[in-house]
Amino acid sequence: MAFFTASTDTVETNTKYAKALKLDYAILSDPGKKVAGAFGVVNDDRPVPFRWTYYIGKDGKVLFVDKEVSAKTHGADVAKKLAELGVAKK
């Protein structure tokens, strides 16, 4: 299993953010918003990305999209959804 964050900020901004928070996962940068647009998290009416979580299978297919992300419970929510999707624990 792999996980990462995607952001429409620049590589430089995301690098500073990751270092400040001592993150142990990657932040992908999409300042042109092409990928964000393809995933529907930005559009003409919503230039700031929605905070959605995509669960993508090994085959590249989207298994589930969580559009109700709560920063307060997200870690537990992700663990629960992974279990529901049958993703093995490490």
Image (spheres, rainbow, N blue to C red):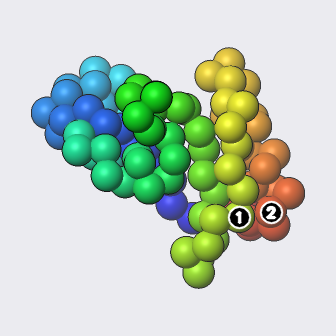
Q: Residue furthest bottom?
A: 59
Amino acid of disc 2: Leu
Dot 1 surroundings within 10 Å: few (below 14), some, or many (20 or more)? Answer: few
How crowded pointer 2 is (Cα within 10 Å; few <14, some 14-19, many 20+) is rated as few
* Rendered view: 80 above or below 56: above
Answer yes or no: do the residues labelled 1 and 2 have beta carbons within 8 Å? yes
Q: Is residue 49 left or right of residue 28?
A: right
At 68% from the left edge and 24% from the top edge, which residue is drawn? 70
Q: Which residue is mark 1?
A: 63
Residue to which mark 2 is pinned = 85
Residue at (23, 44) in percent of width and height: 32
The C terminus lies in quadrant: bottom right
The quarter of the picture where residue 18 lies is top left
Residue 43's x, y, as percent?
A: 44, 38
Q: Position of residue 11 (x, y in %)?
A: 18, 39
Q: Residue at horizontal 70%, vertical 43%?
A: 66
Q: Quadrant of the N terminus?
A: bottom right
Residue 41 placement, left or right of 11: right
Q: Secondary structure at mark 2?
A: loop
| Residue 72, picture quadrant | top right
User: Is residue 11 visible in the rendered structure shown here?
Assistant: yes
